[in-house]
Image (cartoon, helix red, strand yellow):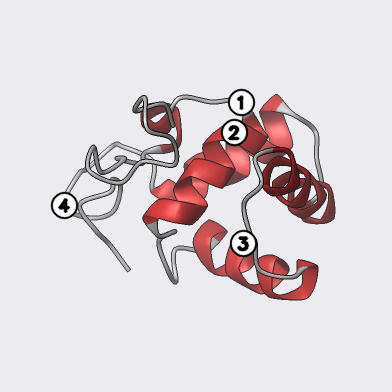
Amino acid sequence: MTSSAGGGPDEPGRPSVGALLRMARRRDRSWSQSRLVREILAVGSQHGKTTANAHSLMIMLSGWENDRAVPDQYNRRLLVLALRKKPSELGLELDPDHHWYPDGDV
């Protein structure tokens, strides 16, 4: 599955969102998928945000990493914060009209 969020056949040579997520998780952090799920849950809790449960997050993460789906705006923010990356480093675009906080922060 390709999207304007990055990667895929329409952008030759650029890694897909899934590949960038896997690299950020495995190469940059040396985390398992379970560890990233725990980090997402922690980030959500720290910011007072609701997240899917651990089992659902694991299924979603697998889909994202294998390019079967692209994270929505809400989960993109969770991923960015959990992985401590800029959205562009993960091949993601954040909708400027979708804010968690009134001051416009992630």
| Cα gap from disc 3 to disc 1, whole angstroms | 16 Å
The crowding category of the residue bearing disc 2, from other C-alpha atoms within 10 Å (few below 14, some 14 to 19, many at least 20), is: some
The crowding category of the residue bearing disc 4, from other C-alpha atoms within 10 Å (few below 14, some 14 to 19, many at least 20), is: few
Q: Are marks 1 and 2 in contact (CB under 8 Å)?
A: yes
**Disc 1 target residue:** 84
Q: Quadrant of the N terminus?
A: bottom left
**x, y percentage for residue 42?**
78, 44
Ranked by sequence position, the earlier of labels 3 and 2 is 3
Left or right of residue 44, residue 73 in this image:
left
**x, y percentage for residue 86?**
45, 25
Q: Amino acid at mark 1?
A: Arg
Q: Nearer the viewer, mark 4 or mark 1?
A: 1
Ranked by sequence position, the earlier of labels 3 and 4 is 4
Q: Amino acid at mark 4?
A: Asp
Residue placed furthest toward the front: 102
**Disc 2 target residue:** 81
Find residue 74 and report its image quarter: bottom left
Relative height, residue 45 to residue 89 (above, below): below
**x, y percentage for residue 96?**
23, 37
Q: Amino acid at mark 3?
A: Leu
The crowding category of the residue bearing disc 1, from other C-alpha atoms within 10 Å (few below 14, some 14 to 19, many at least 20), is: few
Q: Nearer the viewer, mark 3 or mark 1?
A: 1
Q: Considering the numbered disc 2 on the image, is that residue within a helix, a strand or a loop?
A: helix
| Cα gap from disc 3 to disc 4, whole angstroms | 23 Å
**Disc 3 target residue:** 61
Q: Nearer the viewer, mark 2 or mark 4?
A: 2
- Disc number placed over residue 10 in the picture, else none: 4
Q: Nearer the viewer, mark 3 or mark 4?
A: 3
Frontmost residue, 12 versus 38: 38
